Amino acid sequence: MNESMYKYMKVGLIHFMAYPSTIKGEGPIVETVKKIAADDYFNAIELSWIKDGDARKQVKKLLDTSHMTVGYGAQPRLLTTGLNINDLDEAGRQKAVATLKEGIDEAYELGAKGFAFLSGHYEEATKEEAFQALVTSTKALCAHAKAKGSLKVILEIFDYDIDKKSLIGPAALAKRFAEEVCKEYDNFGLMVDLSHLPLLRETAEQAILPVKDYLVHAHIGNAVVKNADCEAYGDAHPRFGFPNGANDVPELVEFLKVLMDIGFLNADNPPVVSFEVKPWADEDPEVVIANAKRTLNEAWARL
């Protein structure tokens, strides 16, 4: 592709994955956000909870100065606490909804345009009950967000039987879910993640085409699925070029091509496409981030 990728998308980075020491809402959040904000390769950033109020104010000032699009990833609020938004135990479900509503409030505080979360564990025997619980919870989040402004509520599609074992899940079920929520709320959409496609055993077309009408956000990254004995097996988001990794430049080219073909990548309203990459063991976050940039640059040149 001869034209700049910035014409068709906003390139983002998921802060709490690139700097995993911040994933619990603590640690060097301000310092690491500043590094991303100072890097003009990125015109979007995705943050998660920031437990300290003063740190949130400092981050907000950096974001206001940066001229970046901001997204809020609430996945750590669930994954680090064990809460499940489709919990069949009503008290447990309400706890999950409550922390996500707090996240929505924080997203507004930070000036975020989108708020992402994931579905929880389920049992095959009670899958339909879990689905209905997820619909109920998601509609509550959409109502909470809509009452405060124009924040988009976004469910990220995860694997259903390997690592996170989330209800949503395969593309067909994701489509059914989005249809159900969008009957009542227009501030909802879906997110696909290149990293999750090998875990879902879906090609880019199989994962994207069924949900194209509901797609509002995308992530790009790598995964190891060759066998369970491999280092970084599962949903670990290792760098591109990682041993036994399923995604590299060719897979990213295919992913971007499908997104371009359906009009998701477009010049009129460029969407956010963010790297979800995580240092493995003692890898340097800065080098892992540079790796991701090189990979996208090469994939775009081949598109």
Image (cartoon, rainbow, N blue to C red):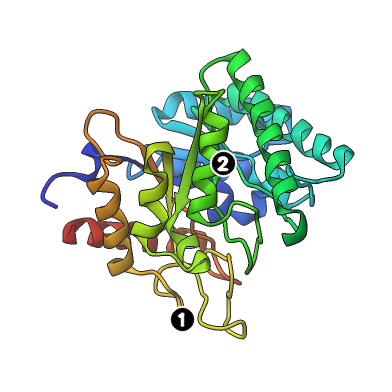
Is residue 27 at all visible to an observer of this figure?
no
Numbered label attached to residue 154? none
Q: Distance between the residues labelled 2 and 1?
A: 33 Å
Residue 89 percent across, percent down from the top left: 87, 44
Given residues 169 and 295, the one toward you in this image is: 169
Where residue 69 sits, quadrant-wise, is top left
- SS at mark 2? helix
Judge the density around disc 2: few (<14), some (14-19), many (≥20) Cα neighbours within 10 Å: some
Return the residue at label 1.
244
Q: In which quarter of the image is the C terminus?
A: bottom left
Q: Report x, y in % for residue 31.
A: 57, 43
At which x and y percent is residue 118?
62, 46
Q: Name the residue located 42 percent from the left edge and 56 percent from the top edge.
A: 207
**Can you identify the residue that label 2 sits on?**
177
Query: Residue at horizontal 28%, vertical 53%?
Result: 258
59 horizontally vs 296: left or right: right
Left or right: 165 as drawn, with respect to 189: right
Q: Viewed as shown, does residue 257 lie left or right of 170?
A: left
